[in-house]
Amino acid sequence: MTLKRNRTYGILPIMVFAALSYLIVYRLISCEFSDYLSDYNSHTYVYLMPFLNDGFIKGWLNRPYCLFQMAVLFFLKVMHLPLEISSILTGSLFFLFSYLLTVFMIKRFCEYKDYEISGIMLGFLSFVLNFAQPFYFEHLDLGTRTSGAFSINPLYSPTQMAAKPFAVICFMLVIDIVNIGKGKSFLDENAGKNGAIFFKGIRSDIGRYIILALTLLISEIAKPVFAEMFIPAVGIYFLWELAIILAKEKKHAADYFKKALLPMLLCALPAVAYMLIQTIAYFAVYGNYDEGSVIVITKWLEVWSLFTENVPLSILFGMAFPIYVIVIDSKNFVKTGMGRIGLISYAVGFLEAALLGENGSKLYDANFMWPMMFGMLILWITTFLHFVGLTYSEEDGVQRKFILYIGYFILILHLISGVSYIFESFGW
């Protein structure tokens, strides 16, 4: 069977899923305000108040990762909407942005691979990727659904969801840079043939690096935890490639450093600089942390163990689909730059969650779980795209179909857990 590239995608089913996603999240965020301790209440009625009462500078000093607050202020001050409606609308639009980006991402990936995918399937897959949650089986008595089994879609967190679309853009830009290639050993099997996978309209390498630097900085302004994971992960990937070049093609090492490693380092500098400014502002000037609270190296999985008695089971519940994809096709998955970046991102996030925390009462805040959740997201995306490739490849056979059916069964279980979470939030 020969598969042709089909550039005509049914826009109607995609927009139906988009409207459905927006309405679900709008209602879900509305329900969050009924919980006095919810993150949406905190970021709307506590962290926004310095911006309203004391001006932008003092508000920024108190909350330097403030993209969510700035968006709320736009709807509040410019559009003259009520405060709570402004917050709900902001969270819903950030989520809708993430959904549309995943549509774009899957569409471009299928075009690159010469796969034909319908608008219904494209909309559905994007819907699944944005609503998937860890497995939730009430009879196993795991406590609340977020205990231990962390999510790639923490819909209850306005800052995490505000950073998510920019994290996805950063991921796509880095994959394009990797796929275009600046040295032989860091090209995957398709690199150099078609160049960029996602942003084909960016013709200039310098333009691509500038956009990456700006997007990474915006993600930092939204919430620093993505950069805390992704910058080290990408750095490790490029250093590993440099080590391979030094071992096999030493004569290309200087060229690789100049054309690949150095530009990526420069892309990270604005975000790193802002991260340092955030740290000074938040901890030393107006931070609300307890006096003497510092980042510490904890015992192995000490913080994670506060939320669950069985960390491996919690990991399995949150990562069942990526684990399955890696198991069924690990050989081909790790051959690609996309696959390796996914694995390294999760490894970096996992190590931060396993070894870092804050002393005193702040230990229970588990703030280093957030970078790990973004590491989960990157591995989810890479395995998700790889599974789409397996679905639409030309290979056939009963065994292959059975393997794919199991994969979709696991994926639907993640979606059902997400639907269960939504129903529970609605009080149904």
Image (tube, rainbow, N blue to C red):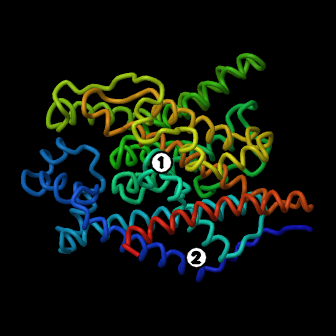
Task: Identify the mark at residue 396; answer none if there is no mark.
Answer: none
Q: Nearer the viewer, residue 114 or 292?
A: 292
Q: Position of residue 65 (x, y in %)?
A: 29, 46
Q: Secondary structure at mark 1?
A: loop
Which corner quadrant holds the C terminus? bottom left
Q: Which residue is rendered at x = 76% and y = 38% of the image?
A: 335
Quadrant of the image occupied by residue 339: top right
Q: Position of residue 25 (x, y in %)?
A: 40, 70
Which amino acid, mark 1?
Phe
Q: Which residue is rendered at x = 63% and y = 56% of the image?
A: 200
Label 2 environment density (alpha carbons within 10 Å; few <14, some 14–19, many ≥20): many
Could you give the CA–CA distance between mark 2 and mark 1, rounded to whole angstroms?
28 Å
Relative to 130, does residue 223 appear above or below in the rendering?
above
Residue 224 seen anywhere in this rendered image of the structure: yes
Relative to 41, does residue 149 appear above or below in the rendering?
above
Label 1 environment density (alpha carbons within 10 Å; few <14, some 14–19, many ≥20): many
Q: Secondary structure at mark 2?
A: helix
Q: Nearer the viewer, residue 356 or 393?
A: 356
Answer yes or no: do the residues labelled 2 and 1 have beta carbons within 8 Å? Answer: no
Q: Which residue is rendered at x = 50% and y = 59% of the image?
A: 138
Task: Identify the mark at residue 14; answer none if there is no mark.
Answer: 2
Q: Which residue is rendered at x = 75% and y = 44% of the image?
A: 327
Q: Is residue 251 left or right of residue 144?
A: right
Task: Identify the mark at residue 150; answer none if there is no mark.
Answer: 1
Q: Position of residue 15 (x, y in %)?
A: 53, 78
Q: Position of residue 280 (x, y in %)?
A: 23, 30
Q: Is residue 360 left or right of residue 367?
A: left
Which corner quadrant holds the N terminus? bottom right
